[in-house]
Image: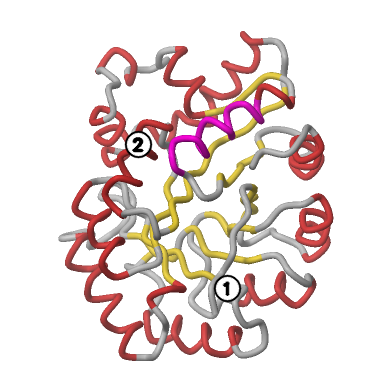
Amino acid sequence: MTIELGPLGAYLTAAEATAAEAVALEEAGYDAVWLAASPSADLLAAERLLDATGRIVVGTSVLNVWQADAEKVADAYHRIAGRHPGRLLLGIGAGHREVDAGYASPLAKIASYLDTLTAAGVPAGRVLLAALGPKMLRLAADRAAGTLTLQVTPEHTRRARAIVGPDKLVIPGHGVLLDTDTGRARATARAAVRPMLGIANYATNLRRTGYTGEDLTDPFSDRLVDALVLHGDAPAVVAGIRAELAAGANQVGLHAIGYDPIGVLRTIARAGRVS
């Protein structure tokens, strides 16, 4: 069964995502909910949201391969997919040297993890890789349904699409912030991206796509902050989503920043069609 993904996805914190939030996003027109950070291997957070909704896809973004046992993940996948066919996606990733104990050879670790999932009967078409660099993107093209990424720009999306080909999923994630005071919005956005821009994998990838040491030095350039966090009024945010879709994204996952994230996501969905 093929998973059809529309253009709008929403990120929720795995530990805090509620059934009511998932229902609200489904009613607002979102096509997927992505469970942020590192959901547990039992996938109970995903199951809870799928049980509460009728059509929306739920995915992990991402299962950390150093923490989530692959055999447990496979068992949980089969338990849930049997009850909600075509609505569960497994996003997996190798984490980061700065935060994951034992981090080494991420490409080999992901390949081994995929071997275990495949042996346990998890279809490759239900797995996405958190792939930034060319080698991981090629692995996503060969052994997964595609890629989902964070801290990227339309230029990276164009490059990812070129590597994975036309038939794979490419799902970039962006922070979104409804604030028409540009200075205040950038200050909020800088605070949101600061922890992640200290991670080498993200910084290296942004350098690949044209950003310089000056852009990446705190307090970070306006052009970088504006690219990573879409801000302004709702039509301005929708324009940023459209830019990602034009670059080759199948869907854009939105992280609402600030007070009332569900309200922010609803407002963006009401601002107009983005397909």
Query: With respect to residue 85, does 132 lie above or below?
Result: above
Q: Is residue 268 left or right of residue 216?
A: right
Quarter assignment of residue 111: bottom left
Secondary structure of the magenta portion, mostly?
helix
For label 2, the residue is 156
What residue lies at 38% left-to-right and 76% top-to-bottom? 124
* Along the viewing direction, whichever of 198 and 206 lies nearer the viewer: 206
First in sequence, mark 2 or 1: give its number: 1
Which quarter shows the N terminus? bottom right
State the image quarter where residue 214 is shown: top left
Q: Are marks 2 and 1 in contact (CB under 8 Å)?
A: no
In the rendered structure, the answer to whether residue 18 lies left or right of residue 185 reads: right
**Tag 2: amino acid:** His
Residue designated by label 1: 88
Whole-percent x, y for residue 175 in the image: 57, 35
Figure quadrant of residue 151: top left
Taking 10 as reference, is 149 left or right?
A: left
Q: Position of residue 42 (x, y in %)?
A: 54, 80
Stretch in magenta: 237-248
**Secondary structure beneath disc 2?**
helix
Q: Give how far across and how far down residue 17 sits, in percent.
A: 70, 60
> Alpha carbon of mark 2 to alpha carbon of mark 1: how far?
26 Å
